[in-house]
Image (tube, rainbow, N blue to C red):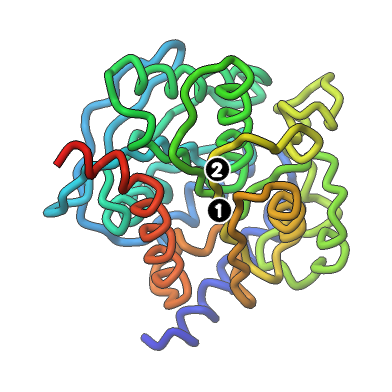
Amino acid sequence: MSDVMRRVLVRQLLHVARAMVVREPTPARFRQVLARAAPFIARREDYSVSEAFPIGDCRGWWVEPSGYDTPGVILYLHGGAFVAKSRAFHDPLLAAICRTGSARGLMVDYRLAPEHPFPAALDDCFAAWEFLLSSGIDPGRIVIAGDSAGGNLAVVTAMRARDEDTPRAAGLVLLSPVLDLTFGGDSVQRNDGQDDLFRAASVGALEPYYGTGIDLRDPRLSPLFGDLTDLPPALLVVGSSELLLDDSVRFAAGSATSTLRVWHGMPHVFPAMRGLAAGDRAIEDIGQFIRQCTDAATAGTG
């Protein structure tokens, strides 16, 4: 199947998912839509996973690409609007990033809203960071990565590590991150109708389940309103037609150590989607960034 045809099929599927969530923007419906769509769009990768094990109040598991050396470590925080998860979607994405980044990945199964609202997810992600450090892994070998809501958690975890004076990760990888839960970026209106997955009228419907009763400008919810200095170098990957495009643009403008990659016409978290040539190229770019971030530490272990 050609890349053009695959892109058309992905767009059609995302439009169906978008319509279903617009009609009923609830956690239950979003979880249902994600579970149904994932098998049709998720990447196919050759990888292994460990048994899940406890990390504080949540759990995690290791994801390792088959047949590759893995000196680095990726702490991965999945997306899903803080209310949903899909191993079928996120495990292969992490495996692909590990394959190109010469790393193994720790997938964090953090607690979800509305059953567990803020700060449960943040506490779980930070506990996973402390777990890696307590395991004796050099922080210079660790990159924190996340997509969408997970990109938010990756930044906030790095901010908390900085503010609590714990070691800094080697880098951040942020895929289509949602960094402003007020959804105040100009692209929310400018790209309405062009984004394959979200509409401006409903894009913020799920996040309040996570931050109930909290000022949405609180940097622990919306890191764009916080201090972006002294964070690890970051790579931001986003599609030009996304409602959330300006979250990445504004982060890059406020962080001198950030690299922004805007991919023309690509949908939300497109590197996770099977058969998109741009997604494969983005995965290669992400891997190169991870290797560059971790090279100094891994060279010392050779």
Could you classify mark 2 by the number of other residues whose Cα lies within 10 Å: few (under 14), some (14-19), or many (20 or more)? many
- Circle 1 is placed at which residue position? 175
Residue drawn at x 73%, y 30% as measured from the top left: 221
> Residue at point 38% right, 30% down?
139
User: Considering the numbered disc 1 on the image, is that residue within a helix, a strand or a loop?
Assistant: strand
**Residues tagged 2 and 1 counted as in contact (Cβ below 8 A):** yes
* Residue 19 x, y percent position in the rendering: 71, 60
Depth check, front residue: 16 or 72:
72
In this view of the protein, which residue sits in the foreground, 37 or 172?
172
Label 2, label 1: how many angstroms apart (C-alpha)? Answer: 9 Å
Task: Give residue 218's quadrant in the image.
Answer: top right
Image coordinates for residue 260, horizontal then vertical, percent: 61, 61
Count residues near mark 1 (Cα–Cα under 10 Å), then give few for <14, some for 14-19, many for 20+.
Answer: many
In this rendered view, identify the residue nearer to me: 144 or 176: 144
For mark 2, give the secondary structure: loop
Q: Is residue 30 above or below residue 17?
A: above
**Amino acid type, callout 1:** Leu
Q: Where the N terminus falls, by quadrant? A: bottom left
255 is higher (above) or lower (below) than 301: below
203 relative position to 29: left or right: right
| Amino acid type of the residue that numbered disc 2 sits on in the rendered structure | Gly
Q: What residue does disc 2 label?
A: 79
Q: Quadrant of the C terminus?
A: top left
Q: How many marks?
A: 2
Is 6 located above or below residue 127 in the figure?
below
Q: Is residue 287 left or right of residue 151?
A: left
Q: Earlier in the sequence, mark 2 or mark 1?
A: 2
Q: Residue at x 45, y 64 (%)?
A: 273
